[in-house]
């Protein structure tokens, strides 16, 4: 079983941009979302994945991710996601022993910037950069599958 332990924070200001080592545009669409979990397709630069993730607001969830052909991902996004799509650019910012993933959202979620950090245990310490704001790990509004159906601009 694959387990993801991830914490999510709002980002304050633009100082994080100085730390960004690379960036990737992303489009992710949701095929299914229920009280059990989500199934999504993500086009990330020149690669594509299908992802299955358990539901919940806990920082620890089951996650399975597999590479799929880019053309298949584009077709799924265009024909099967029914508009349940999130567009963003992900920036990778190292901080101590970890790399934060900063998502700058576009479209209906423009103006939202969040940082995620993956941990190896629930209680693992990590460096908190000055631009790291309020933790929103337990707030369902910030789940990408929810942003696909109830975007930031509608809050």
Image: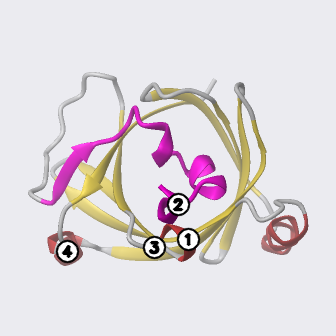
The residue shown at (78%, 72%) is 70
Q: Are marks 3 and 2 in contact (CB under 8 Å)?
A: no
**Residue position marked by numbered label 4 in the rendering:** 14
- Which one is in front, 70 or 108? 108
Q: Which residue is mark 1?
A: 108
Q: Earlier in the sequence, mark 4 or mark 2?
A: 4
Residue at which label 2 appears = 154
SS for tag 2?
helix
**Label 1 Cα neighbours within 10 Å, binned few <14 / some 14-19 / many ≥20:** some
Q: Bounds of the magenta span? A: 131-155
Alpha carbon separation for disc pair 3 and 2: 11 Å
Q: Where's residue 149, x and y in %?
A: 66, 54
Q: CA distance from mark 3 to mark 4?
A: 15 Å
Vertical placement of 27 versus 143: above or below? below
Circle 2 residues within 10 Å: few <14, some 14–19, many ≥20: few
Q: CA distance from mark 4 to mark 1?
A: 21 Å
Spot occupied by residue 118 in the image (x, y as percentages of width and height): 38, 41
Q: Position of residue 69 (x, y in %)?
A: 81, 67
Residue labelled with disc 3: 110
**Side of 20 where 78 appears, left or right:** right
Q: Decide: marks 2, 1 in contact (CB < 8 A)?
A: yes
């Amino acid at each position: 079983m694959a387990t993801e332990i991830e914490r999510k924070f709002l980002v304050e200001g633009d100082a994080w941009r100085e730390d960004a080592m690379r960036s990737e545009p992303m489009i992710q669409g949701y095929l299914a979302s229920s009280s059990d979990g989500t199934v999504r397709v993500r086009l990330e630069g020149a690669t594509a994945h299908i992802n299955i993730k358990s539901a919940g607001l806990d920082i620890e969830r089951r996650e399975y991710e597999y590479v799929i052909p880019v053309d298949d991902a584009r077709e799924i996004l265009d024909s099967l996601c029914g508009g349940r799509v999130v567009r963003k650019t992900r920036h990778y910012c190292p901080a101590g022993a970890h790399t934060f993933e900063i998502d700058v959202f576009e479209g209906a979620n423009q103006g939202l910037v969040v940082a995620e950090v993956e941990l190896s245990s629930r209680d693992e310490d990590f460096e908190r950069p000055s631009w790291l704001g309020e933790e929103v790990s337990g707030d369902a509004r910030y789940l990408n599958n929810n942003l696909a159906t109830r975007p930031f601009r509608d809050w």
